[in-house]
Structure formats: structure tokens, C-alpha cells
Image: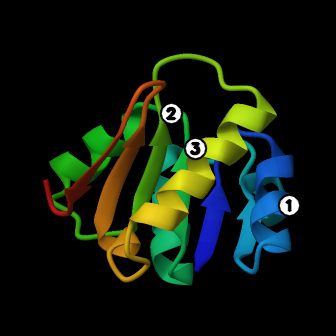
Amino acid sequence: MKFLMDMPLSPDLATWLAENGHEAVHAVELGLYRASDSTILERARKDERVVVTADLDYPRILALTQSQGPGLILFRGGNYSETESVARLRRVLDTVNPEELPHSIVVIEKDRIRRRRLPI
């Protein structure tokens, strides 16, 4: 699975994904540290990557454009430590079918994980 980590999240999360057999890059590595959310979504779509973020604007953009991708994993509901982020992301990867991730929005909250198919 290929991922693009957005600016609100630590590059260490991309490193963890890579160490666990995924292809992951952080927005900084792609020169997207000042890019708009729409630009990041377009880059992820072009590169066939799932965006991992804590930015609440992404689901709105995907809904307004009726987009079928890229997939999105959204950390919501507060600050997560590195340990919490890894544990919750591991849970997503263990429970959501990899074939569904590129066409889904997965919302990670402190007490649950929800998935919704795109478009929304």
C-alpha cells in the first residue's frame, strides 16, 4: 500500500509504515510543505497514494468534488502521541481491506474507527 503523510503528522509515522512493508512519503519529502489541500489530494491521486492526515478539510473537499479517490485516513478528536498514532494506524491496516482503502475515508477517533466508501 502507498501512503502520503500530510503536514500535521510526524514524518516518523511514514517511517513506521515503510518499516512495515508499505511505501510511505511525507509531504515535506515531496516539496509539498506549503501546498494546498487540493494540491496534496491531486498528487496522492496521481501517485495512487492514500492520504493520512489530521486536517478536517480533506473530507469536505472529497465530498464537494464527489471524488472516488484518493483514499483518506483521518486522525480526528485531539492530539495523538506517536505510540497512539501507530497503534490506531496498525488497527486500520489490520481491519480494513487494502483494496478498499484507496476508495474510502477512514476516520480514526479516540474510541472508534469508522469507514465510509467514496464518493460521499
Q: Which residue is mark 2?
A: 55
Q: CA distance from mark 2 to mark 1?
A: 20 Å
Q: Is residue 72 visible?
A: yes
Residue 77 lies, in percent from the top left, at 46, 19
Q: Is residue 7 visible?
A: no
Depicted 39 relative to depicted 102: above or below: above
Residue that appears at 19% across and 48% down: 63
Give the crowd class for mark 1: few <14, some 14-19, many >=20 residues within 10 Å: some
The three-letter amino acid code for the residue at tag 1 is Thr
Looking at the rendered structure, the secondary structure element under dot 2 is loop
Residue that appears at 62% across and 68% down: 3
The three-letter amino acid code for the residue at tag 2 is Asp
Between 31 and 3, the residue placed more toward the observer is: 3
Q: Nearer the viewer, mark 3 or mark 1?
A: 3
Q: Sequence order check: which comes first, mark 2 or mark 1?
A: 1
Q: Is residue 110 left or right of residue 9?
A: left
Q: Nearer the viewer, mark 2 or mark 1?
A: 1
Residue that appears at 73% across and 69% down: 24
Depicted 72 relative to depicted 87: above or below: below
Q: Is residue 78 left or right of residue 87?
A: left
Q: Which residue is mark 3?
A: 88
Q: Is residue 61 left or right of residue 58?
A: left
Q: CA distance from mark 3 to mark 2?
A: 17 Å
Q: Are dots 3 and 2 in contact, CB under 8 Å? A: no
Depicted 14 relative to depicted 18: above or below: above
Between 73 and 113, the residue placed more toward the observer is: 113
Looking at the rendered structure, the secondary structure element under dot 3 is helix
Between 63 and 80, the residue placed more toward the observer is: 80
Q: CA distance from mark 3 to mark 1?
A: 15 Å
Looking at the rendered structure, the secondary structure element under dot 1 is helix
Q: Which residue is mark 1?
A: 15
